[in-house]
Image (cartoon, rainbow, N blue to C red):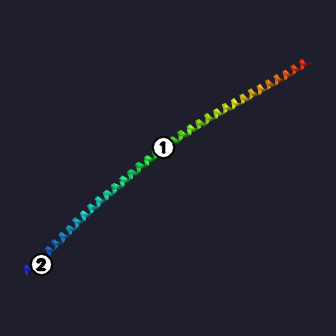
Amino acid sequence: EASRAASQFTRVQKSALVDATAASRRAEAARQDAEAAFRRDRVVFRQRLDAAEAEAAALSARRREDNEERARLDALVHESVEAAEEARRVVLERDETVRAARAAREAADAAAAASSDERSRLHESVDD
């Protein structure tokens, strides 16, 4: 009976050892799965981080381009204002030149009319 009990104890020990070995293998497999999942997650996180950094760089570049475009537009507006002021000055000078020419023509017309009147009076006085 003692040998039967010892044999049964040995079977229980063997069974416990088999169970413990299986549990250890499952734990090792679970640890390997967790490590693989961690590596996959780390790769995905790195990809997301790289994508976020690339997006931030693109936004920064767009902002810089927008600022450059705004500066170009400001310069164009400034040049347009200067050109408009120059055009206005030229038009005012032209208008002044036209007024002066008109006044000179009117003065010349008046002088010609006065000369013509004087000639007519002289002719009349000669005729008398």
The residue where tag 1 is placed is 67
Q: Position of residue 110 (x, y in %)?
A: 80, 26
The residue where tag 2 is placed is 8
Identified at 53% across, 42% down, the residue is 73
Q: Position of residue 116 (x, y in %)?
A: 83, 23
In this picture, residue 106 sits left or right of residue 44:
right
Element type at mark 2: helix
Cα–Cα span, label 1 and label 2:
86 Å
Above-or-below relation of 13 to 31: below
Task: Identify residue type, mark 2.
Answer: Gln
Task: Identify residue type, mark 1.
Answer: Asn
Q: Quadrant of residue 43?
A: bottom left
Identified at 41% across, 51% down, the residue is 55
Q: Quadrant of residue 97?
A: top right
Residue at the front extreme? Answer: 127
Task: Give the quarter of the figure containing the N terminus.
Answer: bottom left
Q: Are marks 1 and 2 in contact (CB under 8 Å)?
A: no
Q: Nearer the viewer, residue 11 or 22?
A: 22
Above-or-below relation of 30 to 86: below
Identified at 90% across, 19% down, the residue is 127
In this picture, residue 59 sits left or right of residue 4:
right
In this picture, residue 90 sits left or right of residue 17:
right
Q: Position of residue 83 (x, y in %)?
A: 59, 36
Crowding at dot 1, Cα within 10 Å, few <14 / some 14-19 / many 20+, comes out as few
Above-or-below relation of 82 to 123: below
Task: Give the quarter of the figure containing the C terminus.
Answer: top right
Element type at mark 1: helix
Q: Nearer the viewer, residue 62 or 80?
A: 80
